[in-house]
């Protein structure tokens, strides 16, 4: 995991030998389970270190709260193979983390990895975001809501901001030309009670493509009718 350790140092993160061993185990389990279920198209050892693990850790560049704050509550919406949630949990073991994944087979992998890596304060929730966001256990309960390019931003905002506590932030990882996507999300951001705080470019030689963190702050409560029922945010985005 030398490339991961080297890249992390560039953004001010020191990964301990024990944490690097956890990342190595995570990689092994990811590749092994990927033979049976579709978790990722990226499986090369160095590629996973950069495009999955380091990419996940760049989210810390958008955090305003101290990284050492043990009371931080995170939810990773549409986490898939556990990205970016699990790499952040390995780095910051004291945070509380919910991994939200609607596909049961992927959720099974997440449960396995959480146990294998001996991660505590992690909950795997197997349901759609549209349903979980109306559950009082999760609605407006998280300091940070994360999502890694699972949908266009207008749809993503409706699926994620309802989880965010007032004063918290939603951080979306995006790639490529995102100007139009951001412009089209203004209505959704406003309706969900948010405000675009910053679009932060990840400027590292490890990522030759354009990568951004879109940071949206939650200013007021999301109206109770949002998100709309399953599938509607994607079919009829609020643009």
Image (tube, rainbow, N blue to C red):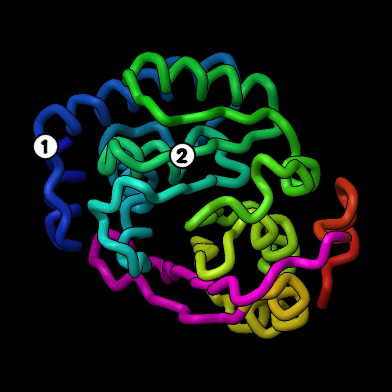
Quarter of the image where one finds residue 38: top right
Quarter of the image where one finds residue 63: bottom left
In front: label 1 or label 2: 2
Q: Is residue 137 above or below residue 68?
A: above
- Quadrant where the C terminus lies? bottom right
User: Label 2, on which residue?
Assistant: 97
Dot 1, how many residues are within 10 Å of its Cα: few (below 14), some (14-19), or many (20+)?
A: few
Q: Position of residue 22 (x, y in %)?
A: 25, 26
Residue 130 vs residue 1, the one in the foreground? 130
Q: Is residue 217 magenta?
A: yes
Secondary structure beneath dot 2 equals strand
Q: Position of residue 143 (x, y in %)?
A: 48, 57
Residue 52 vs residue 194, the one in the foreground? 194
The magenta segment is: 195-224
Q: Residue at x 40, y 76 (%)?
A: 200
Q: Is 100 situated left or right of 131 in this image?
A: left
- Quadrant where the N terminus lies? top left
Q: Position of residue 116 (x, y in %)?
A: 36, 14
Quarter of the image where one finds residue 127: top right
Q: Position of residue 112 (x, y in %)?
A: 47, 15
Q: Residue at x 35, y 25 (%)?
A: 119
Residue 190 is tagged as none
Total count of labels: 2
Q: Is 79 situated left or right of 235 in this image?
A: left
Gap in Å between the C-alphas at discs 1 and 2? 20 Å
User: Label 1, on which residue?
Assistant: 16
């Amino acid at each position: 995991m030398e490339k991961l350790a080297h890249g992390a140092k560039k953004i001010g993160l020191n990964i301990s030998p024990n944490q690097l061993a956890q990342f190595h185990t995570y990689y092994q389990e990811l590749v092994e389970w990927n033979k049976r279920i579709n978790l990722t198209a990226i499986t090369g050892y160095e590629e996973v270190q950069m495009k999955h693990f380091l990419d996940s850790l760049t989210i810390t560049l958008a955090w305003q709260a101290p990284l050492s704050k043990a009371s931080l509550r995170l939810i990773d919406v549409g986490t898939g193979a556990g990205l970016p949630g699990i790499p952040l949990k390995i780095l910051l073991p004291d945070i509380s983390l919910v991994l939200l994944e609607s596909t049961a087979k992927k959720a099974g992998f997440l449960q396995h990895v959480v146990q294998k890596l001996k991660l505590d304060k992690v909950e795997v929730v197997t349901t759609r975001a549209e349903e979980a966001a109306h559950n009082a256990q999760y609605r407006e309960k998280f300091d940070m809501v994360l999502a890694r390019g699972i949908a266009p931003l207008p749809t993503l905002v409706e699926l994620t901001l309802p989880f965010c506590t007032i004063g918290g932030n939603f951080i979306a990882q995006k790639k490529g030309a995102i100007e139009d996507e951001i412009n089209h999300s203004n209505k959704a951001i406003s309706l969900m009670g948010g405000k675009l705080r910053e679009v932060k470019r990840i400027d590292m030689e490890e990522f030759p493509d354009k990568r951004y963190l879109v940071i949206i702050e939650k200013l007021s409560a999301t109206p109770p009718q949002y998100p709309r029922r399953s599938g509607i945010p994607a079919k009829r985005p609020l643009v």
